[in-house]
Amino acid sequence: MKNIIYLVLVGFAIMTFNACHSDNHQTADSPADKPMVVSHTDTLAIHQLVQQFMNYAVEKNYAEAAAMLYEIDDNDINQEPILLNNEKMESVRIALSKFPIDGYEINKMTLKEAKDNNVECTIHFFGTATTKWYFKPVRYLGEWRLCMLNSLTGDKPISE
């Protein structure tokens, strides 16, 4: 009888310990708590995306440039980047055509994790005029997608 009571107590103690450390509670070492490491390969992929977009714009391939842009719906739990709809792509295409780009430089890339990145570019147009453009590359399901930010409103998509 003592053995049965002892086994019940040990079993109860184990169940209590497991309940306190269940999979529903993440520990400090869980993968979800660790930020994504941005590798050299990621940096190159982002640089190539921005460069491709800007080259399309310089070459006046505005539709191709606009077709590269994605946006994130803040109401989407997964925050999946989606391609701009036709109306927004046309808006970007028109904006690009009104201010033909003569050249550009990629000034600064701040890459932190899948959804917290920023690329700053200096854009040259009308000979000596310059402005800054900001891109927000986002990694989703292992692929980088190019979002563009409105520099006047900070971390807001250009399409709003």
Image (spheres, helix red, strand yellow):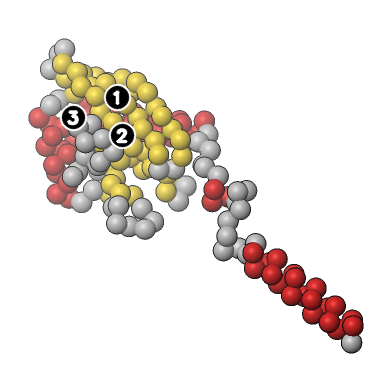
Residue 88: % across, % down: 17, 46
Which residue occupies 69% across, 70% down?
16
Foreground mark, 1 or 3?
Answer: 1
Q: Is residue 26 above or below residue 107?
A: below
For the C terminus, give its image quadrant: top left
Outermost residue, bottom side: 1
As drawn, the label of residue 135 is 2
Task: Using the numbered discs, state the Cα–Cα distance from disc 2 to disc 3 in whole angstroms.
Answer: 19 Å
Residue 139: % across, % down: 42, 44
Residue 32: % across, % down: 54, 51
Mark positioned earlier in the residue sequence (2 or 3): 3
Q: Is residue 53 visible?
A: no
Outermost residue, left side: 98
Q: Is residue 50 visible?
A: yes
Mark 2 touches mark 1? (CB < 8 Å): yes
The kind of residue on which mark 1 rests is Cys
The kind of residue on which mark 3 rests is Lys
The kind of residue on which mark 2 rests is Phe
Q: Give the residue number, with chain letter if any, for mark 3.
A: 60
Q: Nearer the viewer, residue 140 or 44?
A: 140
Residue 118: % across, % down: 36, 32
Q: Give the residue number, with chain letter if any, for mark 1.
A: 121
Q: Is residue 108 above or below residue 94?
A: above
Task: Using the numbered discs, state the Cα–Cα distance from disc 2 to disc 1 in whole angstroms.
Answer: 8 Å
Q: Nearer the viewer, residue 34 or 98?
A: 34
Q: Residues within 10 Å of mark 1 (few under 14, many from 20)?
A: some
Q: Residues within 10 Å of mark 2 (few under 14, many from 20)?
A: many
Q: Nearer the viewer, residue 16 or 84?
A: 16
